Image (cartoon, grey):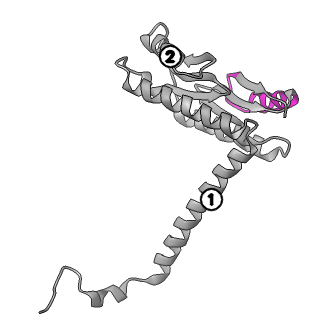
Amino acid sequence: MSVTGPWPCRHARRIPRAPLLLALVALLLTGCTATVYTSYQIATDQRSFETQHLDFGIAGTIKARLLESDVKGTGWVEVYCRRGVVVLVGVVERGSAVDRESVAVARRVEGVKRVETYFVPSRPSWVSDYTIKLKISARLIMDWQLRESQVTTSVLAGHVVLIGVVDHADKVKKILDYARATGGVVVVKSFIQVAPS
Protein backbone atom coordinates (compact mmCIF):
# COMPACT_ATOMS: atom_id res chain seq x y z
CA MET A 1 0.00 0.00 0.00
CA SER A 2 1.42 3.39 -0.93
CA VAL A 3 0.77 6.50 1.06
CA THR A 4 0.59 9.79 -0.76
CA GLY A 5 -0.09 13.26 0.52
CA PRO A 6 0.45 16.89 -0.31
CA TRP A 7 4.10 16.78 0.80
CA PRO A 8 6.05 13.58 0.24
CA CYS A 9 8.73 12.80 2.83
CA ARG A 10 11.53 12.97 0.29
CA HIS A 11 10.99 16.77 0.03
CA ALA A 12 11.56 17.28 3.75
CA ARG A 13 15.32 17.18 3.17
CA ARG A 14 15.10 20.37 1.14
CA ILE A 15 14.27 22.55 4.16
CA PRO A 16 17.38 24.55 5.04
CA ARG A 17 18.47 23.49 8.51
CA ALA A 18 20.45 26.60 9.53
CA PRO A 19 17.47 29.03 9.55
CA LEU A 20 15.38 26.45 11.38
CA LEU A 21 18.07 26.04 14.05
CA LEU A 22 18.48 29.80 14.40
CA ALA A 23 14.73 30.23 14.85
CA LEU A 24 14.67 27.49 17.48
CA VAL A 25 17.62 29.01 19.37
CA ALA A 26 16.00 32.48 19.23
CA LEU A 27 12.76 31.06 20.59
CA LEU A 28 14.57 29.30 23.45
CA LEU A 29 16.60 32.41 24.30
CA THR A 30 13.48 34.57 24.32
CA GLY A 31 11.77 32.18 26.72
CA CYS A 32 14.85 31.98 28.92
CA THR A 33 15.29 35.76 28.91
CA ALA A 34 11.67 36.29 29.93
CA THR A 35 12.00 33.74 32.73
CA VAL A 36 15.26 35.25 33.99
CA TYR A 37 13.83 38.80 33.84
CA THR A 38 10.66 37.78 35.71
CA SER A 39 12.75 35.99 38.35
CA TYR A 40 14.95 39.08 38.69
CA GLN A 41 11.89 41.30 39.15
CA ILE A 42 10.47 39.06 41.87
CA ALA A 43 13.80 38.77 43.68
CA THR A 44 14.60 42.49 43.61
CA ASP A 45 11.12 43.68 44.56
CA GLN A 46 11.01 45.40 47.93
CA ARG A 47 7.83 43.52 48.84
CA SER A 48 7.86 39.99 50.23
CA PHE A 49 6.91 37.23 47.82
CA GLU A 50 3.61 36.79 49.69
CA THR A 51 2.78 40.50 49.35
CA GLN A 52 3.68 40.43 45.65
CA HIS A 53 1.37 37.46 45.22
CA LEU A 54 -1.50 39.20 47.07
CA ASP A 55 -1.02 42.43 45.09
CA PHE A 56 -0.99 40.52 41.81
CA GLY A 57 -4.23 38.78 42.78
CA ILE A 58 -5.92 42.03 43.80
CA ALA A 59 -4.93 43.78 40.55
CA GLY A 60 -6.03 40.79 38.47
CA THR A 61 -9.41 40.58 40.20
CA ILE A 62 -10.07 44.29 39.74
CA LYS A 63 -9.04 44.17 36.07
CA ALA A 64 -11.30 41.16 35.43
CA ARG A 65 -14.26 42.90 37.08
CA LEU A 66 -13.64 46.10 35.12
CA LEU A 67 -13.65 44.08 31.90
CA GLU A 68 -16.98 42.51 32.94
CA SER A 69 -18.55 45.86 33.91
CA ASP A 70 -21.54 47.18 32.00
CA VAL A 71 -20.00 50.68 32.07
CA LYS A 72 -18.35 51.25 28.71
CA GLY A 73 -14.65 52.15 28.95
CA THR A 74 -13.78 50.57 32.30
CA GLY A 75 -11.84 47.81 30.53
CA TRP A 76 -9.26 50.37 29.38
CA VAL A 77 -8.32 51.45 32.89
CA GLU A 78 -4.85 50.30 33.97
CA VAL A 79 -4.75 48.68 37.42
CA TYR A 80 -1.72 48.59 39.72
CA CYS A 81 -1.50 47.34 43.30
CA ARG A 82 1.38 47.76 45.73
CA ARG A 83 0.96 46.59 49.33
CA GLY A 84 -2.82 46.79 49.05
CA VAL A 85 -2.83 50.32 47.64
CA VAL A 86 -4.57 50.29 44.27
CA VAL A 87 -3.77 52.90 41.63
CA LEU A 88 -6.13 53.26 38.67
CA VAL A 89 -4.71 55.07 35.63
CA GLY A 90 -6.25 55.85 32.28
CA VAL A 91 -7.87 58.11 29.74
CA VAL A 92 -11.26 58.99 31.21
CA GLU A 93 -13.51 61.92 30.35
CA ARG A 94 -14.22 64.25 33.25
CA GLY A 95 -17.45 63.40 35.03
CA SER A 96 -17.89 60.07 33.22
CA ALA A 97 -19.24 56.96 34.91
CA VAL A 98 -15.92 55.19 34.27
CA ASP A 99 -14.23 57.06 37.13
CA ARG A 100 -16.96 56.22 39.67
CA GLU A 101 -17.38 52.62 38.51
CA SER A 102 -13.64 51.89 38.51
CA VAL A 103 -13.22 53.14 42.07
CA ALA A 104 -16.35 51.31 43.26
CA VAL A 105 -15.17 48.04 41.70
CA ALA A 106 -11.70 48.37 43.24
CA ARG A 107 -13.04 49.15 46.72
CA ARG A 108 -15.16 45.98 46.72
CA VAL A 109 -12.14 43.69 46.28
CA GLU A 110 -10.85 42.00 49.42
CA GLY A 111 -7.40 43.16 50.53
CA VAL A 112 -7.66 46.68 49.08
CA LYS A 113 -6.51 49.24 51.66
CA ARG A 114 -6.85 52.39 49.57
CA VAL A 115 -7.77 53.39 46.00
CA GLU A 116 -6.00 56.22 44.16
CA THR A 117 -6.77 57.44 40.64
CA TYR A 118 -4.94 59.37 37.96
CA PHE A 119 -7.08 60.02 34.89
CA VAL A 120 -6.48 62.32 31.94
CA PRO A 121 -9.25 63.37 29.49
CA SER A 122 -7.36 62.52 26.28
CA ARG A 123 -4.19 61.01 24.89
CA PRO A 124 -2.97 62.77 21.76
CA SER A 125 -0.01 60.46 21.03
CA TRP A 126 0.65 56.88 22.11
CA VAL A 127 4.05 57.06 20.40
CA SER A 128 5.16 60.12 22.34
CA ASP A 129 4.03 58.58 25.63
CA TYR A 130 5.79 55.30 24.87
CA THR A 131 8.99 57.19 23.97
CA ILE A 132 8.88 59.05 27.30
CA LYS A 133 8.38 55.75 29.14
CA LEU A 134 11.39 54.19 27.39
CA LYS A 135 13.60 57.18 28.22
CA ILE A 136 12.65 57.06 31.90
CA SER A 137 13.24 53.29 32.02
CA ALA A 138 16.67 53.77 30.42
CA ARG A 139 17.62 56.34 33.08
CA LEU A 140 16.53 53.99 35.87
CA ILE A 141 18.42 51.05 34.38
CA MET A 142 21.63 53.10 34.09
CA ASP A 143 21.55 54.04 37.78
CA TRP A 144 23.08 51.11 39.67
CA GLN A 145 21.53 52.27 42.96
CA LEU A 146 18.01 51.85 41.60
CA ARG A 147 16.15 48.77 40.44
CA GLU A 148 13.80 49.41 37.55
CA SER A 149 11.67 46.48 38.67
CA GLN A 150 10.71 48.38 41.84
CA VAL A 151 8.85 51.08 39.91
CA THR A 152 6.20 50.83 37.22
CA THR A 153 5.85 53.80 34.89
CA SER A 154 2.65 54.73 33.08
CA VAL A 155 2.60 57.72 30.72
CA LEU A 156 -0.60 59.37 29.53
CA ALA A 157 -0.45 62.58 27.45
CA GLY A 158 2.96 63.38 28.93
CA HIS A 159 1.71 62.80 32.47
CA VAL A 160 4.07 60.34 34.16
CA VAL A 161 2.57 58.15 36.87
CA LEU A 162 5.04 56.21 39.02
CA ILE A 163 3.88 53.26 41.11
CA GLY A 164 6.17 51.14 43.25
CA VAL A 165 7.89 50.32 46.51
CA VAL A 166 11.47 51.32 47.34
CA ASP A 167 13.58 50.93 50.47
CA HIS A 168 14.67 54.55 50.96
CA ALA A 169 13.18 58.03 50.46
CA ASP A 170 16.32 59.17 48.60
CA LYS A 171 15.45 56.71 45.84
CA VAL A 172 12.02 58.27 45.42
CA LYS A 173 13.65 61.68 44.95
CA LYS A 174 16.10 60.28 42.37
CA ILE A 175 13.34 58.56 40.41
CA LEU A 176 11.23 61.74 40.42
CA ASP A 177 14.23 63.81 39.30
CA TYR A 178 14.90 61.42 36.40
CA ALA A 179 11.26 61.53 35.32
CA ARG A 180 11.04 65.34 35.54
CA ALA A 181 14.26 65.76 33.52
CA THR A 182 12.89 63.69 30.64
CA GLY A 183 11.85 65.61 27.54
CA GLY A 184 8.12 65.74 26.83
CA VAL A 185 7.07 65.23 30.45
CA VAL A 186 4.23 67.54 31.50
CA VAL A 187 3.53 66.32 35.05
CA VAL A 188 5.00 63.66 37.34
CA LYS A 189 2.70 62.00 39.88
CA SER A 190 4.24 59.61 42.39
CA PHE A 191 2.50 56.71 44.12
CA ILE A 192 5.86 55.29 45.24
CA GLN A 193 5.85 53.87 48.75
CA VAL A 194 8.88 53.65 51.02
CA ALA A 195 9.22 50.34 52.85
CA PRO A 196 12.60 50.05 54.62
CA SER A 197 14.01 46.53 54.69
Given the image, on which type of amino acid does mark 2 rest?
Answer: Arg
At 57% from the left edge and 61% from the top edge, which residue is drawn?
Answer: 30
Where is residue 196? Give x, y as percent: 84, 30
Q: Which residue is depicted at the point 84% across and 34% down?
A: 197
Q: Which stretch is magenta?
A: 170-189
Q: Which residue is mark 1?
A: 33
Q: Work out whether 16 lies above or below 82.
A: below
Q: Which residue carries the number 2 mark?
A: 108
Instruction: Tell me how far mark 1 sits from mark 2, CA to CA.
Output: 37 Å
Q: Give the residue at the far left of this rendering.
A: 1
Q: Specify whether residue 13 is painted magenta.
A: no
Q: Is residue 178 magenta?
A: yes
Considering depth in this image, is 164 or 178 the residue closer to the camera? 164
Q: Nearer the viewer, residue 155 or 110?
A: 110
Q: Quadrant of residue 107?
A: top right
| Coordinates of residue 122 in the picture (x, y in percent) | 50, 20
In the rendered view, tell whether residue 140 sits above or below residue 161: below
Could you say whether the residue bearing mark 1 is in a helix, strand or loop?
Answer: helix
* Left-right relation of 27 to 5: right
Residue 195: percent from the left, percent from the top?
A: 80, 28
In the depicted structure, whether residue 145 falls above or below residue 170: below
Task: Out of 8 and 137, give the one closest to the viewer.
Answer: 8
User: The disc labelled 1 sits on which kind of residue?
Assistant: Thr
Whether pointer 1 and pointer 2 mark residues with C-beta atoms closer than 8 Å, the reply is no
Q: Earlier in the sequence, mark 1 or mark 2?
A: 1
